[in-house]
Amino acid sequence: MASSPRSVRRVLIASTIGTAIEWYDFYLYATASALVFGPLFFPGSSTAGGVLASFATYAAGFVARPLGGLLFGHFGDRVGRKAMMVWTLLIMGVATFGIGLLPTYETAGVLAPVLLVTLRVAQGIGIGGEWGSAVLLSTEHGPPGRRGFLSSWPAMGFAVALFGSNLTFVLISKLPEEDFLTWGWRLPFLASSVLVGIGIWVRLGIEETPEFVRGRAENRAARVPVLMVLRRWPRRVVIGILASLGTGSVIAMFTVFLVAHAAKAGPEVRSTVLTGLMIAALGECVTLPVFGALSDRFGRRRVMIFGYTVAVVAMVPAGAWLSSGDPTLVALVFILALTVAHGAIYGALAAFLVDLFPTMVRFSAIAVTYQVGVTISSFLPLIAVAVTGGSSALFPVIALFAVVQLAAAIAVACAPDSRADAVLAADLAGERRPVGRAVRGEVGDHR
């Protein structure tokens, strides 16, 4: 039984606002890693070396995301989705505010990058649990036939955050270079504390999902949900990881590596690129629910494979077009890559993963598959910098990106039809059926 329309609307608003705040915090770091963290926290190395070290700290946050997914997924399946949403936002807020207070290498020496990495890991743990809790609160409050559309709302939080974080840096980058590198870059991190307080207040007012409450009443919780998932549905886990890898690689390459690559052309190009990112992010706020609804109507696989294909098309001219500083070409690259390609993939991805797993282990399952996939994708900027070695020739990078997108598309194409699966059909229909031999200490029948 789904919640009332009023409850669903309230949950969607809470999920979207909270997710936007968390992603804003997370992508503040991504933008700063491409623009300022190299010289401030890793001085004394070559330009390429500083960018490489900065990207390594960016990747550290992604390495922590599966840990956050495991931690919050475990308690989300055993305790509930709502409480996890509050904790993830609180952890993210404290870590982000702390980054804004950090001393630089010039002041604190090697302690500065150590503290930076520590807080980045804390950010990763918070965002690792955020995605699963927001997605499940949205989808489990509504009917299964609208999961694509409902899950696209917390996805919109990502697009809003990408717009907001880049807008912030566009504004502060207008400061004199010395002020920007001294104190200007800190302002977005410190200001996020206000947004976090609002987000926590909003999330405290929502209810637990009816699907989870019903499942907890009728089934015994798995002792270790993630182990059960790995034992019973390993093929689905691999499919989910590859699908998420394709999604994360679009963001890692277009918003981190290519931004840093284009910024070498000078401050004017940097400002143009950030403006293009903002335009594309606003466009994605519109396309995400559209593609989510289309995935409900025509299927997740068709929509996602379309997105992977467009991402490769956008990657081919991206390096040259972004470095040109031409506002039209810059906007076109980001609109193709983010508004269209990422909008299609991300708009359908959450519902695609939710459909793969039953309710009482679903948080752990989607948190781990998604976070592992995007964690792997976070290393692509590092690999790309290492491959190019500061060169402007991007053909190897384009080829690598195309291989990743092809692997993701094949995985999605080979995904089982959950609606035809006896185990999950019972779950989606709200019927109580056994799923075979019960494992001691685990769920005997699933929802």
Image (cartoon, rainbow, N blue to C red):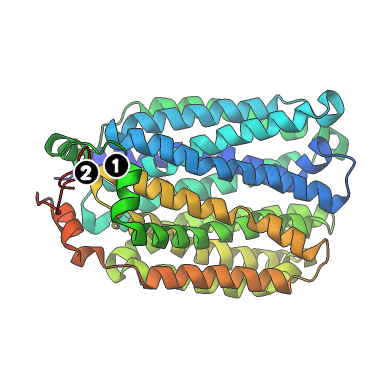
Q: Is residue 174 left or right of residue 136?
A: right
Quarter holding residue 182: top right
Residue 195 x, y percent position in the rendering? 52, 30
Q: Nearer the viewer, residue 145 or 63?
A: 63
**40 over 413 or under it: above or below:** above
List x then y, in percent, for residue 246: 51, 63
Q: Between 27 and 56, which is closer to the camera in this rendering?
A: 56
Residue 134 appears in which quarter of the rendering?
top left
Indicate which disc residue 9 carries: 1
* Quarter placement of the N terminus: top left
The residue located at (81%, 54%) in the rendering is 268
The residue tagged with tag 1: helix, strand or loop?
helix
Report whether 66 appears left or right of 80.
right
Front residue (pair 110, 250): 110
**Residue occupying the point 41% across, 28% down:** 86
Mark 2 and 1 residues: CB-CB less than 8 Å, in contact? yes
Picture residue at 28% right of the left edge, 57% below the top: 355
Q: Amino acid at mark 2?
A: Pro
* Amino acid type of the residue that numbered disc 1 sits on in the rendered structure: Arg
- Mark 2 to mark 1 CA distance (whole Å): 6 Å
Q: Which residue is mark 2?
A: 5
Is residue 357 in view?
yes
